[in-house]
Image: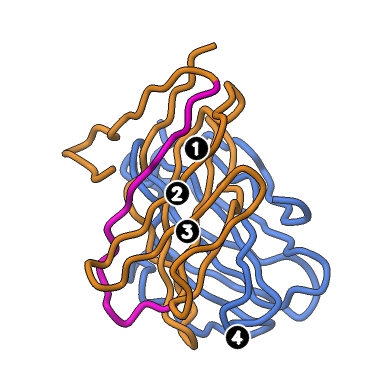
Chain colours: A blue, B orange
Amino acid sequence: NAGVMQNPRHLVRRRGQEARLRCSPMKGHSHVYWYRQLPEEGLKFMVYLQKENIIDESGMPKERFSAEFPKEGPSILRIQQVVRGDSAAYFCASSYNSQGNTIYFGEGSWLTVV
Amino acid sequence: GESVGLHLPTLSVQEGDNSIINCAYSNSASDYFIWYKQESGKGPQFIIDIRSNMDKRQGQRVTVLLNKTVKHLSLQIAATQPGDSAVYFCAENISGYSTLTFGKGTMLLVSP
């Protein structure tokens, strides 16, 4: 987990509000991944980004969810108009490239929708 | 170590025992496999990986075995310690593709 920084670690939002989760990859890594984990389940892929590009968003819900990884600054996962079902742990991971290099995870952001 | 409904399969061992955690992967095209350890409230921590051109790989106190014929992966932990208590996930990947596909996890409980 060393080096992948996520914030906030815990976030509480009321239904209908927006949630923004931030991720800074490990130094030297330009590939960022977001995963979601529901209680007692494995991680589910959401989106894969490189700087300024979304490479694969096949796991991302079509509505309310968006992700970006700007040229400068952290990657952002944005959830608009949150619902209770969005409550989960959201993990960011990074790698040096996409060719089978080890993917390292951050400590996660726990979103609770009340 | 397969998931049953919403409850994680659990392996309970005594400190000092050897532990074996199993995983059946789904895609015969997968050629890279990783074991992660996840403690409560934390992110997955890389333990060991193996590529499909190998059957076995050893690390410090851990060994991963890969049986491609039956699409089975196992993690062996020698001399299990209370600090090894966590949920263990296997993950599979196809080279050139970005995503990891995770199994549902096995909870390892180590009693002192």
Q: How far apart are marks 1 and 4 (CA)?
A: 28 Å
Please provide the residue range marked out in magenta: B16-31
Q: Distance between the residues labelled 1 and 3?
A: 19 Å
Query: Percent from the top left, x then y, of residue A5?
Result: 73, 52
Disc on res. A35: 3
- How dense is the environment of label 3, judged by Cα within 10 Å: few (below 14), some, or many (20 and up)? many
Give the residue drawn at x 40%, y 67%: B92
Disc on res. A53: 4
Say whether disc 1 or disc 3 marks the residue closer to the N-terminus: 1
Give the residue drawn at x 28%, y 34%: B9
In the picture as drawn, the residue positioned furthest to the top comes out as B112
Both on one chain, marks 1 and 4?
A: yes
Badge 2: chain ID: B
Badge 1: chain ID: A
Q: Do the residues labelled 1 and 4 touch (CB within 8 Å)?
A: no
Both on one chain, marks 2 and 4?
A: no
- In this rendered view, identify the residue nearer to me: A110 or B54: B54
Magenta run includes residue B23: yes
Disc on res. B75: 2
Q: How far apart are marks 4 and 3 (CA)?
A: 17 Å
Q: In this view, does A43 lie above or below A54?
A: above
Disc on res. A13: 1
Task: Give the main secondary structure of the magenta stretch.
Answer: loop
Disc on res. A2: none
